[in-house]
Image (cartoon, rainbow, N blue to C red):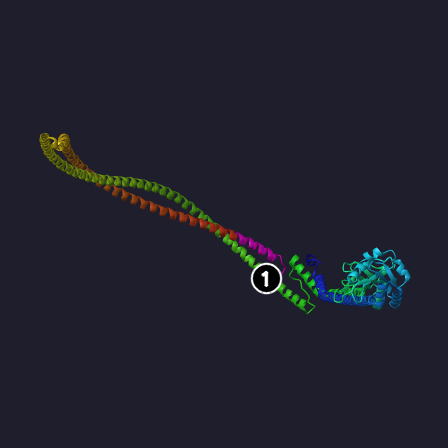
């Protein structure tokens, strides 16, 4: 049952359900755990029993195979059998094989073969004759090849042997020469595989005594091929059969190493007792559930009847508002205590309703008086707000006019400041110009002095040039005299004449260079004199310009003083206008604050009106609530 469906049940149904669950749930859980535990124990017992039967079958078959293999090997070592193969006389070997078959009835026949696969001796002549002409088939048989290699094989056990006409286990052992160890032939002992049924008969009888008719035993190869089934042709096949198996291990070497011995049963038959027990338990649990549900219903009915009566009284109070009705209490349990508490609550509610009705009348009258006072106060504040709004508009206009005056005073102040800066800049520039002119005058005076000194040095160079010219003339004369003396000297004076000629040439060049230097000095002197004249004229003009600059400087200083005085006056005017603007702004802010306060007062008054209206509504509602009960 889902939780929403449980929520739709009444108290009686929920109590019945909960009590039933509390009573039955532990029983169901314990029964379920016990049934599962019992089934698990039964499964463990069945599996253990099947495992024991499989192990027993494995041990029996393994012991039987080991015994048969040992017997076959001992028969292959018989001296008469060896002698028969050596001499080719087989009367004695036929007698030996016939006697062995009579003693060991589990073998269907014994045959002696040569190395070429020819049957030469057998337990019966008919058996020997049945192998005539099959030498090649014998040589290719798996059991024959295994015997030549010295071991046994069960490869041919999965099919019926055509010679013996049944399923046999070919146990073949080599016949060896006693001294040389040479292989003489192969002895075959055909073990009747149907004898396994005799081996498992005891296990099947034990299962029948336990009423387990479906018990069966199987023998399979390692690959799963079926070798033996105790059920025979009427084998039943159950997909979920209960089975246990044992594997023939290599601990004891035999032909059945790796075989799987399986014991199995039908689960319906094995677990029939458990299923019957489970069915009986289920019936008992259902009976307990029915009894627990009936007891829970009676218990819930006894609990919910007083609550139902109390519910009817409560519903009448809610629907009709009748607080005059009485409730009878008949029980002394928790439900009776709840009913007494409810009666007391109704009495208290009656007294509360009477007090509420009296209070609502007083509250209604008080709200009416508050409404009249609020309306009168709203009318007065409305008139004050209109006058304040007109005053605020006037203050706004004054503030705008003051702001315009302040802006214009600021503009004049900026212009005066610019004029003051220009005056200061002009005076500074004039002062710098006068300093530059004075510096230029000093440089011109110094240049005049330098030109004078240059003229003097040029005159000195002219004197030096005249001296050099005189020396050149004298050298020329001396060279001429030397040339004359050289001519007089004849051959001895030719070298001296050449030297005198060169000296004369140099003297002539010096005279020409001196003349050129003199011309250049004359030109330089004239240029210097012209420069001196121009310097003197520039100096005179510079003196005149310097005088005019001094006059302009004095005028500029006077103008700067006037601008400074105007600047101070404008600054005072601007400060006065700024102070006036600040005062007007404070007046406007005060008007704005006053307007804000008036607005807040209006909002508060409106809130008071809303509260009064809400109180009126609450009073009305309280009056309606108080009137909804009869006291």
Specify whether residue 380 is in view. Answer: no
Q: Main secondary structure of the magenta part?
A: helix
Residue 8: quarter of image? bottom right
Residue at image point 51% right, 53% down: 611
Is residue 105 positioned above or below 452 on the image? below
Q: Which span is picked out in magenta?
A: 613-631
| Residue 470 location (% of width, % of height) | 9, 32
SS category of the residue bearing label 1: helix
Residue 151: quarter of image? bottom right
Of the 4 image quadrants, the one containing the N terminus is: bottom right
Is residue 59 positioned above or below 578 on the image? below
Asked if residue 47 is among those painted magenta in the image, a careful observer would answer no
Residue at image point 38% right, 47% down: 589
Residue nearest the viewer, comparing 402 with 259: 259
| Residue 603 location (% of width, % of height) | 47, 50
Residue at image point 90% right, 61% down: 125
Residue denoted by label 1: 352
Residue nearest the viewer, comparing 544 with 405: 544
Q: Is residue 92 left or right of residue 407?
A: right
| Residue 166 location (% of width, % of height) | 87, 59
């Amino acid at each position: 049952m889902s939780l929403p469906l449980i929520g739709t049940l009444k108290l009686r149904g929920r109590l019945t359900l909960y009590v039933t669950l509390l009573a039955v749930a532990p029983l169901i859980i314990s029964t379920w755990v016990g049934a599962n535990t019992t089934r698990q124990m039964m499964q463990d017992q069945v599996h253990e029993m099947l495992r024991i039967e499989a192990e027993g079958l494995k041990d029996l078959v393994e012991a039987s195979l080991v015994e048969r293999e040992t017997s076959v090997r001992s028969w292959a070592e018989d001296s008469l059998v060896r002698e028969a193969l050596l001499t080719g006389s087989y009367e004695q070997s036929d007698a030996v094989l016939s006697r062995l078959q009579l003693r060991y009835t589990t073998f269907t026949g014994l045959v002696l073969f040569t190395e070429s696969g020819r049957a030469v001796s057998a337990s019966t002549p008919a058996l020997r004759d049945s192998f005539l002409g099959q030498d090649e088939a014998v040589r290719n048989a798996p059991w024959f090849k295994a015997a030549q290699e010295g071991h046994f094989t069960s490869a041919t056990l999965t099919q019926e042997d055509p010679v013996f006409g049944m399923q046999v286990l070919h146990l073949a052992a080599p016949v060896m020469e006693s001294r040389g160890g040479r292989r003489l032939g192969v002895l075959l002992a055909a073990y009747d595989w149907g004898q396994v049924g005799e081996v498992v008969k005891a296990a099947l009888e034990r299962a029948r005594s336990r009423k387990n008719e479906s018990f069966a035993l199987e023998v399979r190869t390692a690959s799963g091929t079926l070798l033996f089934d105790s059920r025979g042709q009427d084998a039943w096949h159950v997909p979920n059969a209960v089975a246990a198996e044992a594997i023939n291990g290599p601990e004891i070497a035999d032909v059945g190493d790796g075989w799987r011995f399986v014991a199995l049963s039908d689960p319906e038959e094995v677990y029939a007792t458990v299923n019957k027990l489970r069915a009986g338990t289920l019936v008992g649990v259902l009976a307990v559930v029915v009894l627990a549900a009936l007891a829970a219903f009676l218990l819930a009915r006894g609990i919910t009847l007083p609550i139902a009566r109390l519910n009817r009284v409560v519903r009448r109070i809610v629907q009709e508002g009748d607080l005059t009705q009485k409730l009878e209490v008949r029980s002394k349990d928790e439900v009776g205590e709840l009913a007494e508490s409810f009666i007391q609550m109704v009495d208290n509610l009656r007294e509360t309703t009477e007090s509420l009705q009296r209070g609502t009348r007083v509250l209604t009258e008080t709200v009416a008086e508050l409404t009249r006072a609020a309306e009168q106060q709203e009318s007065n504040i409305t008139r004050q707000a209109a006058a304040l709004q007109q005053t605020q508009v006037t203050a706004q206009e004054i503030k705008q006019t003051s702001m315009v005056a302040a802006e214009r005073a600021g503009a004049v102040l900026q212009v005066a400041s610019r004029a003051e800066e220009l005056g200061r800049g002009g005076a500074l520039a004039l002062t710098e110009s006068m300093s530059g002119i004075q510096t230029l005058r000093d440089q011109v005076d110094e240049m005049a002095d330098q030109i004078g000194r240059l003229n003097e040095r040029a005159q000195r160079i002219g004197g030096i040039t005249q001296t050099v010219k005189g020396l050149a003339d004298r050298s020329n004369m001396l060279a001429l005299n030397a040339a004359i003396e050289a001519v007089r000297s004849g051959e001895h004076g030719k070298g001296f004449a050449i030297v005198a000629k060169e000296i004369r040439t140099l003297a002539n060049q010096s005279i020409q260079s001196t003349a050129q230097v003199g011309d250049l000095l004359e030109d330089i002197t004239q240029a210097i004199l012209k420069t001196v004249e121009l310097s003197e004229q520039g100096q005179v003009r510079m003196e005149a310009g310097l005088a005019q600059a001094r006059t302009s400087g004095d005028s500029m200083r006077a103008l700067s003083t006037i601008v400074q005085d105007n600047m101070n006056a404008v600054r005072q005017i601007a400060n006065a206008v700024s102070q006036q603007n600040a005062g007007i702004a404070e007046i406007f802010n005060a008007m704005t604050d006053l307007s804000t306060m008036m607005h807040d007062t209006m909002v508060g008054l409106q809130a008071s009106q809303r509260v009064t209206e809400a109180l009126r509504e609450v009073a009305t509602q309280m009056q309606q609530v108080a009137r909804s009960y009869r006291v």
